[in-house]
Amino acid sequence: MKKSIILIIGLLLSFHINSQETSSLSLQQAIDYALKNSYATINADRDVDIAKKKKWETTTIGLPEINAKIDYQNWIKQQVSLLPAEFFGGNPGEFEEISFGTKHNMNATATLNQLIFDGSYLVGLQSAKTYLKISENAKEKTELGIREAVINAYGNVLLSEESISIIEKNIKTLKKNLDETNQIFLNGFIEEENVEQLKITLSSVKSQLSKTKNLKTIAYKMLNITLGMDINASVILTDSLENLAKENIKLELLSSDLTIENHIDFKIAKNTETANELFVKLEQSRALPTLKSFVNFGYAGYGQDFDFMKKEQRWFDYSLLGVSLDIPVFSSLARSSRTQQAKIELEKAKTNLTETEQKLFLLLESAKTNYNFSIEEYETSKQNLSLAERIENKQQIKFFEGISTSFELLEAQRQLYTMQQNYLQAMLNVIANKATLDNALNTPINKSN
């Protein structure tokens, strides 16, 4: 029995492991996936859906509305009225106790309401359209932010992978150097200090490897969250850091101009201005009269017993047509105060629009500067890495030939390790700054088929 349970658990674990599919993603595929599945995208789509429903809700205010109502009353003890007794042949000055109505009453009504004119309703329709545009603009901005976030997360994973590969290669070289140096020491040709210095360097590089592996795990989890995947999902990245860096070097972008009217931040600020203009119109429309009409149909039934379900029950129909005209006359200047407040908010929105325009041009210049610098830094770090590799290689030869000291070899190795990390970071900076420049230029998102 125990063996059977173990076998079943083993089969379940095997099925669970096999069911976790590994996703292979290029950077473009990762962006496409996130634009459909990221948490921010899902909620942005929901916000747009809410705006569409809100628009229809506002539209229905001016459409016919029908309400039905059923009332039932049971007089447990009917109300008594006093009438002069002489009405019924009694003595003057005396009163008769009379109960009007029946013990059971039922009333069923249906009312049709129709708004004929309301200035605020017309403004409300315009506001609902603007609200929808704002939601759609927010979604577009969210998608641009997701693209940049995916690029950065994808690049960080590649950076950690490349770092681990380089560090492992360095460790392999250090171990070889340590073995050879130790053998020379045992033969009595060098001092033990040379061996100890290499051991310290090897220990430090191993520690760096352990730290980088932990960072790689976190980088993958951050990428999964950005994509909208399970945090522990298995992902394989098919692009390399070096190829992406080369692909993202596009010097023509440095001379690109910004069409401010097409930038998403400008459109959002412009829609905010439009919304405040509508708020002014809304407050002004409150001074206009409101005209409504209604038609009411109903049936009423009465009885001393609850016989409303019987065919013999008599029902009395009635109907009513009405028109209501609400004319604002005097509000103690409350409407005027609200209108003035709305106008002030409109002026603030116009100022914010101007500020947004200036900030977008400044942001573009800053993004171009950073992007240009990252390209120059990439080229410089590439050359420096090549020089550092040659220097370290020469120092190894000199050290093992007894020409240079272990200290000189150690300095050359440290310089090489620094140049390696600088080169990786420079490639990542090119990719990240290109993404920032794309957002500053409001470059449309390219979605692969």
Image (cartoon, grey):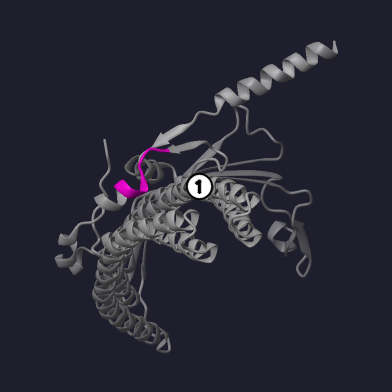
Mark 1 surroundings within 10 Å by alpha-carbon count, few (fewer than 14), some (14 through 19), many (20 or more): few
- Between 345 and 62, the one lying in front of the other is 345
Vertical side of 193 occupied by 340: above or below? below
- Between 139 and 317, the one lying in front of the other is 139
Vertical side of 253 occupied by 339: above or below? below
Number of marks in the rendered image: 1
- Between 52 and 28, the one lying in front of the other is 28
Q: Which residue is mark 1?
A: 173
Let me know if residue 117 appears in the view: no
Q: Quadrant of the C terminus?
A: top left
Mark 1 secondary-structure assignment: helix
- Between 190 and 446, the one lying in front of the other is 190
- Percent x, y of residue 204: 60, 58
> Going 26% across and 54% down the picture, which residue do you hit?
248
Chain part drawn in magenta: 237-243
- Percent x, y of residue 287: 33, 78
Q: Is residue 238 magenta?
A: yes
- Percent x, y of residue 425: 40, 59
Q: Quadrant of the N terminus?
A: top right
Which corner quadrant of the image does residue 397 belong to? bottom left
Q: Is residue 389 magenta?
A: no
Which corner quadrant of the image does residue 15 belong to? top right
> Going 51% across and 50% down the picture, which residue do you hit?
219
